[in-house]
Image (cartoon, helix red, strand yellow):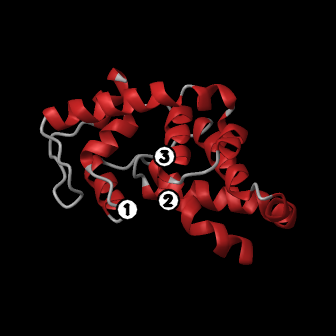
Amino acid sequence: AEFRQRHGRALYGFSLLMTLGDSLWASALTHDALDQLADYADQLEQSGRAAAVLRGSVLAELRSSEPAVPADDVSRLAALSDMQVSAVALAGLAALPPVERATLVMADVERLSADDVSLCVGERHVVQLPTIRRRYAAAAAAALAGGASLTPEQPADALDLDEIRRAG
């Protein structure tokens, strides 16, 4: 129970960003990762790598599954608004493949160490972080130019995540 309390909320936030605001899928990914690793909680806590290993579990499951019922874009923006994620930021994240999205979120949002990010996604992606940041920024700028909102309270009606994913 203590392991869940210590890591559950932050892991859910990571999962929510990874699923681009699909709260049901994010909940399932978070729950599964915590359940999978609960037996190893003491070892993970002692190693100081619990956050990285949990995120790696979420990423692996995300890459091998799909949501039962995908969330619509309005629901996604609503779920992310509590985290102060705007339509512009969401568009930037949507343009990145999952491993690059995880790299960016862990390094720049969660501020995990390069070693932890590397443990989760591999050193190659940590080295590519400047390129990942540029791709994110370009997609976010394009969304802003297309009318997406910078504030979570004012989501853009015209944000089309499927189109952004195809273009990314």
Can residue 84 be seen from the camera position used here? yes
Sequence order check, earlier mark of 2 and 1: 2
Q: Which residue is mark 1?
A: 83
Sequence order check, earlier mark of 3 and 1: 1
Residue lying at 63% horizontally and 62% vertically, measured from the top left: 31
Q: Secondary structure at mark 3?
A: helix
**Disc 3 to disc 1, how far (Cα)?**
15 Å
Query: Would you say 156 lies left or right of 107 here?
Result: left
Kind of residue indicated by mark 1? Met
Q: Which residue is mark 2?
A: 13
Residue lying at 85% horizontally and 64% vertically, measured from the top left: 46
Location of residue 12 by image quarter? bottom right
Q: Secondary structure at mark 2?
A: helix
Kind of residue indicated by mark 3? Asp
Q: Secondary structure at mark 1?
A: loop
Residue 3: x percent and y percent?
Answer: 73, 71
Sequence order check, earlier mark of 3 and 2: 2
Can residue 1 be seen from the camera position used here? no
Q: Which residue is mark 3?
A: 108
Q: Badge 3 local density, few (<14 within 10 Å), some, or many (20+)? A: few
